[in-house]
Amino acid sequence: MWRTRRRSQIMFYENSAWKKHKSCGTSSLLPMTPKNPQQWLQVVGHAGSFHVGDYGTLLKRFCEGERQCYLKLMEDTLRPFVPAYYGVVQRDEQDYNMMDNLLTHFNTPAIMDCKMGSRTYQEEELLMAQERPQPRKDMYEKMVTVDPEAPTDQERAQQAVLKTRYMQWRETLSSTATLGFRIEGFRKANEECHTNFKRTKSREQVTEALGNFVESNTHIVWGYLRRLKQLRQELETSNFFKTHEVVGSSLLFVHDWNGRTGIWMIDFGKTVALPAPLTLDHRTPWVEGNREDGYLWGLDNLIDILANMLPLT
């Protein structure tokens, strides 16, 4: 994720052996390069933003804001819930943030990207768009592709919309506005990617999509539910989380046929530190200027939906 909106990409390759690896002046235990050919698994996003690194790592195109977040997270109580971070490396004259490949230890995994929060744009982006209003034809075209009836008569006459209008309209389409999170996409083992969730909005629609992803496997649901509750507990005490506006960040869900499950926070390119002494509770509804992002509100709803997918005992 960068200051422009970029959605996550996910890839993996399998390996099991380990050895020492040095990078950026640090020494860490990382898995050895696998003998099998590398495999690429992408759910959503822009090609070229990620590369498979050596020793079980992932290289993500460099973003200074994301680097700063990972450096802080490595010292925070949230460390077990984010990819381990190893610093900056260069490939073909391009800088990358190097982190753990989270899918390494799963066998033919199913993966899902959930964008967290009640908005996916920064207040700074909104302010800049307000200060420099400029009708955008590309955003008009995106709008009518999703909903031909969405533009006003004036927007239709101009064949363009303001960025502020587009950003706020976009959030009303999905469960971002109604539940504080949305499914960006998922891929079950050995299947094509499912990314048609732009208008998945109601609790019932989200429940159906999640049920499809886990294939009604209660063991998988239990595993995810435990992990989400652990994450919520840590988020409510984390100093990093309390002092950052977390926008555009995702939860990566992973499970495999062995019943292993994992969830991690990813994508911090739009996460920004708050000016002291401001803090957020991440549940208060957002109004322009309060910086609230709705992350915990979304997490509460996600936990509740998964809990209701389990049989009554």
Image: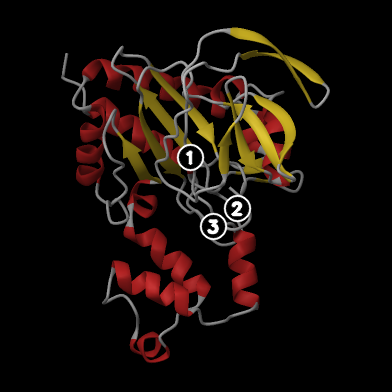
Q: Secondary structure at mark 3?
A: loop
Q: Where in the figure is residue 244, as x and y percent of width and height? A: 65, 42
Residues packed near mark 2 inside 10 Å, few (<14), some (14 to 19) or many (20 plus):
many
Horizontally, residue 86 falls left or right of residue 39, namely right
Which image quadrant for residue 203? top left
Compared to residue 22, the image places residue 131 above or below, namely below
Q: Residue at x 31, y 31 (%)?
A: 304
Q: Where in the figure is residue 157, as x and y percent of width and height? A: 37, 92
From the viewer's side, name the closer residue of 23 and 297: 23
Residue under numbered circle 1 = 250
Q: Residue furthest left?
A: 312
Image mark for residue 182 = none
Q: Residue at x 41, y 38 (%)?
A: 113
Residue under numbered circle 3 = 121
Q: Residue at x 83, y 23 (%)?
A: 25
Amino acid type at image mark 3: Tyr
Give the quadrant of the C terminus.
top left
Horizontally, residue 25 falls left or right of residue 185, namely right
Amino acid type at image mark 1: Ser
Residues packed near mark 3 inside 10 Å, few (<14), some (14 to 19) or many (20 plus):
many
From the viewer's side, name the closer residue of 51 and 177: 51
| CB within 8 Å, label 2 to label 1 | no
Residue under numbered circle 2 = 291
Q: Where in the figure is residue 61, as x and y percent of width and height? A: 64, 44
From the viewer's side, name the closer residue of 306 and 74: 74
